[in-house]
Amino acid sequence: MPDPLDDDRLTLAGLLIESSVGLRSQLGRRLEDECGLSLQWFDLLIRLARSPHHRLRMAELAAQTVLTPSGLTRAVDRLEEVGLIERTACPSDRRGAFAVLTDEGLRQVRTAVPAHLIHLEEHLTGVLSESERSQLKELLRKIRDHVNPDARPSGELRQFPQP
Amino acid sequence: MPDPLDDDRLTLAGLLIESSVGLRSQLGRRLEDECGLSLQWFDLLIRLARSPHHRLRMAELAAQTVLTPSGLTRAVDRLEEVGLIERTACPSDRRGAFAVLTDEGLRQVRTAVPAHLIHLEEHLTGVLSESERSQLKELLRKIRDHVNPDARPSGELRQFPQP
DNA sequence: GGGGCTTAGTTGCGTGTACAAGTACTATAC
DNA sequence: GTATAGTACTTGTACACGCAACTAAGCCCC
């Protein structure tokens, strides 16, 4: 009788989590050192940068990221304080708010992205062949779609309804 | 000229992080509801359970988990308070401390693991075929070993020097 | 058009975390 | 053998996060 403590699925889950946490910490350190942006901020900024008009509703942004709506509110507060994003009211729904990238915010993302791509290459894609990368992408997409179906775009540009 | 914002590597990194975060939040919720253990605690307990004599040096445990030494100290404090683990002095190095699973701690892990395996099956391995699982495992192992070479065992039982 | 119900976002509060400084011990050098 | 450097862990402090409760606005339906 095999000990359930040795189950293979535990290993797989452990590897997934360790890879991700390890990668995050490496990328975060590099980005912080070289661009003065936390990974969290960079993540929010780049998602806005990739969206039409450089803006997204708070709820959409929250769904795409690691944050709860509450966490996003504070994060956006901080980003607004340093002038990288702004809030604007939604004309068609007065409850809603858009987070909009400022010019300075866009400038910072565009500066940070090339550095980030280098880090990515060093810490992630560098150890994988072309075909491994696409294998991994498909496998992870399955998992992501299953555990968090709301978080569609993370590179896959989806069709946003124009605001 | 392709926009660097659309680079494929960003997608891959995003998928990895989203998968892991999504999985963690699903697993954490289930485990909390059904076993009264946070994923953090479960992670610590299971690592001890898989180690010889059900014990590990604080530094080793910290390296294997998501925590810094400081974070681990508090986490172990809390686990000690509820009687799931204990600290014992290291005879050969009086600076060091072992975290040791108590009988109650071991009991709780052994109770939680079967439930956790079911959750794992539902949220992770269920969407993958046998061959996809082993593909994914090898890919992730490469990444994990690259981003966090200290975190060897997460299923791969390594040979510990006997204390 | 005024009750109920839902949704979008924000705030109060407790908890958990990391960073940096501190303590106690070990190892190295001379 | 004693000064110096390094290691293993712990504490002080500050901050970011999630949960739950709240406000405000939209939606429905009679």
Image (cartoon, coloured by chain):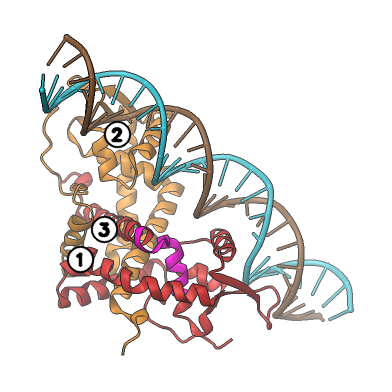
Chain colours: A red, B orange, C cyan, D brown
In terms of sequence position, does the residue under pointer 1 or pointer 2 come before the other? 2
Q: Which residues are magenta?
A: A33-47
Q: Are marks 1 and 2 in contact (CB under 8 Å)?
A: no
Residue B92, picture quadrant: top left
Q: C8 left or right of A141?
A: right
Q: For mark 2, does the 10 Å Cα neighbourhood hold few (<14), some (14 to 19), or many (20 or more) residues? A: some
The CA distance from mark 3 to mark 2 is 27 Å
**Mark 3 = which residue?**
A19
On the rendered image, what quadrant is the C terminus of chain A found in? Answer: bottom right
Whole-percent x, y for residue A60 in the image = 52, 73
What residue type is disc 1 on? Leu
Left/right placement of residue A97 relative to residue A145 reads: right
Asked whether B16 or D26 is in front, the reply is B16
The disc placed on residue B106 is 2
Of residue B4 and residue B54, the one placed in the foreground of this image is: B4
- Determine crowd level at label 3: few under 14, some 14-19, many 20+ residues with C-alpha closer than 10 A: many
What number is the disc on residue A73? none
Q: Can see residue B50?
A: yes
Q: Residue at x 14, y 27 (%)?
A: B163
Q: Position of residue A1 (x, y in %)?
A: 15, 45
Do marks 3 and 1 both belong to one polypeptide chain? no
**In this orientation, which residue lies closer to the viewer: A20 or A146?**
A20
- The residue where tag 1 is placed is B136
**Mark 2 element type:** helix
The reply, left or right, for residue B19 in relation to residue B153 is right
The picture places residue A122, in percent across and down from the top left corner, at 22, 65
Q: Amino acid at mark 2?
A: Leu
- Assign a secondary structure to mark 1: helix
Question: Which of the two discs, 1 and 2, sits closer to the camera?
Answer: 1
Examine the residues drawn in magenta and state their main secondary structure: helix
Query: Label 3 amino acid?
Result: Ser
Q: Is residue A1 above or below residue B79?
A: below
